Amino acid sequence: MLLAEREPLKVLENCFGYTSFLWKQEEIVRHVLAGKHALVVAPTGIGKSLCYQIPALINEGLTVVISPLIALMKDQVDALENRGIDATYINSSLGRVKRESRYAALKNGSYRIIYVTPERFRKTDFVEAISERCIDLLAVDEAHCISEWGHDFRPDYTRIQEFRQVLGNPTTIALTATATPEVQKDIIKALCLDAGQVRIFHGGIDRPNLHLEVEKVFDDDEKLEHIISITKKYDGNGIVYFTLIKQLNNFSDLLSARKIPHLCYHGNLERVQRSRVQERFMGGVNTLVLATNAFGMGIDKEDIRFVTHADMPGSIESYYQEIGRAGRDGKDSLCTLLYDEHDLLTHMNFIKWNNPDSEYFQRVYHILEENTEKISAYGLDWLKENIHFRSGHDFRLETVLNMFDRYGVIELGSAPLKIEIVSGIHPQLLDQDFLDAKLKRDQQKLYTLVQYTKYEGDRKAFIHEYFGLPYGSNTFRP
C-alpha cells in the first residue's frame, strides 16, 4: 500500500466506499494507529468495527478481534472478503479440516484480520499458530462481557490480560454499546491497564430521532390492540419483541386471525428457517417480525420504523440495545414498551433459574461425575429427572451446564448429550457470597427497569443517568 493510500480517509474510501467518517471514528482510528489504547462506548449502528478494521489495513501486522458472537463472525468476514480484504474467523462452528487449514494459513502469514472467541485461547494449537505472528492490534468486541457487573458476563473474557500477553501486549481497543461506569472500570482493569493509559471515547446514548414511550397494559388483548395500532400508524418495517416463544406464537395466531402479515423468529426454529426469516426481513418493505431477543445479531437495517417490546426486557442494557435497531437512517422511529405487571413474575423466575446456589452447583457436578455413561445414553431429560425429581419446570440445570462450560469445567458434545469433565468446579461457583452478590445485581437491574416504566420525566434522561452520562452533552448525531 502506497504511503498516500495509508491515510485513514483514503482507506475508508477505497476499501469501504464511504467519503467521510461518522462521529469520532477518525479520531479513534488515529489514536489507535499512534499505539494508544482505547475504550469505545457508542450506540449500536455507529460503525464501531471500522475503528479497528481501518487500522488493521494500515498496520503491517495482524489484527486479532475477540468476540463472543459466533453468529456474526461469518457475516463480518464475508463482508470484508467481498471488499477484497484478507480476513477469517476460527471458532467452534468449523470442522477439524477447515480449522487446521486456517491454522496453517495463519502460521504462514495469511490474513490481516482474524476473529476468534475468547474460548479459542484454551486451545494449544491455536496459541501455537497465533504465536508465530506479529500482532499490531487487539480488538475486544462486546467488551461489557469482561465485567461481572455487565449484563452478559463471560468468564473467559476475564482472561483478556493473559491473551494480551500471549499476543505480545499489543495496542488494544475495547468496544461496547452499553457500559455503566462500573463496567467501564472493570473493562480497563481486566485489560491490566491503568486508567490513564486508556482513553474513553463515549458516543452518548441519545439518538434524537428515537421516540421512547411506555404504555401500561393489563392483559394480552390490550397488548394486541397497541401492536396493531403501531403497525398502522408507522408505515415501514418493525420488530415486536417477546420474552417467551409460547407468547410469541400466541400473538402470531392472533395477528393471523386479524389478517396482519408478519414473520416469526425465535431460537426453536431450524437454522435454515431463521436465515430465511432474517433475509426476508432485511430485504423487505413494510415487514413486521415477531421475535425473541435471539433476533438482533446481524440486523443492520436502516429503515426500521418501530421497535415494540410486548413483554418487559430483562435490563436497561438489553432494552437499549434492542431499541437501538430502530431509525438508523435518522428518520423518526417509535420505541414502545408495553408494561404489564404480570410480566414481572416471568423475569423473577428467570432470575431464580439464572442464579443457582453453590449447593446446586455441587449436586450437579457430583451427578455428572457418577453418571457419565447414562447421561451420554439418555440425554438431558434423564439428567433433569435425576436432579429435579418431580419438578420439570426448573431451568437451573441449563444455567449450571452453561456456566460449567464457560468456566472450563466441562466440554459439551452430542450423543445425545456428551459431557466430559475437564476440571474441578471453579471457586467462584462455590462462593455463596459471590453468587448472592450476582443475584442481588440481577434483581436490582429488574427493579431499575420497573422504575423506568413508572418514570414520568424524560425517559432518555433516565437512561443517561443509569449509564452515568450528563444528559444533552453527548448526543450522537450522524
Image (tube, helix red, strand yellow):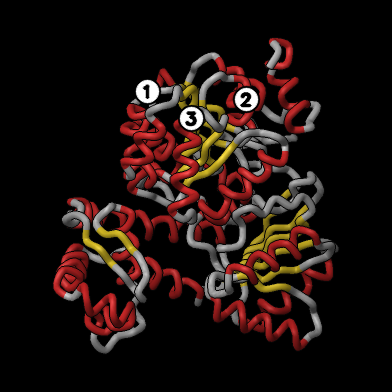
Q: Residue 440: image x %, image y %?
A: 32, 57
Q: Quadrant of the N terminus?
A: top right
Q: Which residue is mark 2?
A: 57
Local SS, label 1 = loop
Q: Residues within 10 Å of mark 1 (few under 14, many from 20)?
A: some
Residue for point 39% across, 73% down: 349
Q: Residue 223: image x %, image y %?
A: 66, 76
Question: In the figure, 235 relative to 384: above or below?
Answer: above
Q: Which residue is mark 3?
A: 108
Question: Mark 3 or mark 2: which is in front?
Answer: 3
User: Quick check: 265 left or right of 140?
Assistant: right
Residue for point 19% across, 66% down: 365
Q: As rendered, which of 414 and 55 lies closer to the eye?
A: 414
Amino acid at the residue labelled 3: Asn
Residue for point 61% across, 81% down: 249
Q: Is residue 208 visible?
A: yes
Question: In the figure, 5 relative to 266: above or below?
Answer: above
Q: Which residue is mark 1?
A: 168
Question: In the figure, 244 relative to 319: above or below?
Answer: below
Q: Residue 457: image x %, image y %?
A: 62, 51
Amino acid at the residue labelled 2: Leu
Disc 3 versus disc 2: distance between alpha carbons? 18 Å
